[in-house]
Amino acid sequence: MPQTHHPVERSEIRPLTGIRGIAALAVVVFHFFPAWLSLLPGLAPLSRMAMRGCYGVDLFFVLSGFIISYAYSAREIRSNMADYRRFIWFRFARIYPNHLATLMLLVALVLGSHVFHYSVPYENYPWSGLPAQLTMTHVWPFAYGGRWNLPSWSISAEWFAYLAVFPVCQLLLNRGWSTARLLAVAYLVFGGYCVFRPFLLWLPFDRPTALPNVAAEFIAGSMLYGVYRAGSPFLHFLQKHATALFILILAVAALAPGQNPWIDRLVILTFPLLLASLSSEESLAGKMFSSALWVWLGNISYAIYMSHSFAAQFFRFVAPEEKYLHAPLSMRLVLVAAHLAAVIAIAAALYYAVEVPCRNWMRRLFIARQKHTEARPLEPTGSR
């Protein structure tokens, strides 16, 4: 009977869980900020930082490569189909329930718009795109899925990374490279993507940069895990100066001129270093992101990310900001606070009612099926 090597449980790196909360909220701010700015024009000085909130997705991709390589270390998961099937099913159980739940919420919203005469951009919600949405292939080449849940493009790309990029990362990590070589590979792939990204935009696909984006950043994060595993002096230097690096990134995001793609790419290229610096709780930033609040936000960050588009559509239906442009300041402040509170409340409900129970049930189902298969007696020779 072939032996299946299961990854052992590893202790949580709490600052990296906390930074996921920052990444999710950054994307929320990016999508809600135009409405907030119309309600509160005094927020204009924050426009540059808010518009760079979309790069929270890049932070997610790099972090995903690191965390998955950390959880499924190359020394613990072997190159056989049994381990690969387990890995794919567990990752499917992690991302699919929320994806399906938010997609169904938007389907209900679109159907309800006909009943309540609520105007939605129906071209973003084509029924013909649902098969690709349901299979999480809607940003793969030649697939057509429409927009539907706008943030889910990255889940489609992440699904591709699980299927195709993670095995490549495992092969690279198994080579036992030095810290310098790991960082060279990370930045060769990551930097190469940043340089050639404009040329990819000419490809005749919806979001033609999605798969190269996730592949480059996932590999960079995985190589970063190799640096973490090696425990080099460079890693300890970064861990010691995490707070300064985090403040520097925030300052560049807030003060650098807008509409400058090269500055933005340089900011993104610091993400592997930032995550390496937050791989311990030695610094002030590491301690801050290890706090209970940030760890909780990190735990529900995927639900925040997946559900905030539905929350935005819901508010456009029940309380469109155009009706409150001349309302008292206190009412406009309450509306902005309600946006953020609703996003977190919906995400928490999704996390506790859908994500956790479905993930646990799907994992138990796989383990029970695997045990049943392993316990099944072999057929006698010649029984057929």
Image (cartoon, grey):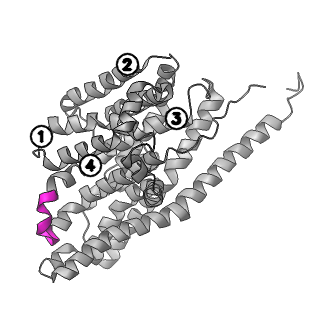
Which of the two marks, 2 or 4, is nearer to us in this view? 2
Identify the residue under disc 4: 54
- The residue pinned by badge 2 equals 180
Compare residues 286 and 364 and report the one nearer the observer: 286
Q: Is residue 41 magenta?
A: yes
**Label 2 is placed on what type of residue?**
Ala
Labels 2 and 3 touching (C-beta < 8 A): no
**Dot 2, crowdedness within 10 Å: few (<14), some or many (≥20)?**
few
* First reached walking from the N terminus: tag 1 or tag 2: 2
* Res. 329 in view: yes
Q: Earlier in the sequence, mark 3 or mark 4?
A: 4
Residue 62 visible, this angle: no
Image mark for residue 260: 1
Disc 4 secondary structure class: helix
Q: Residues within 10 Å of mark 4 (few under 14, many from 20)?
A: some
Q: Quadrant of residue 195?
A: top left
**How far is disc 3 from disc 4 in space, using C-alphas?**
25 Å
Residue 132: percent from left, percent from top: 41, 46
Distance (Cα) linking label 2 and label 3? 19 Å
Mark 3 and mark 1: Cα distance apart in space: 34 Å
Q: Mark 1: few, some, or many residues within 10 Å (few <14, many ≥20)? A: few
Residue that carries the numbered disc 3 in the rendered image: 70
Q: Position of residue 204 (x, y in %)?
A: 24, 34
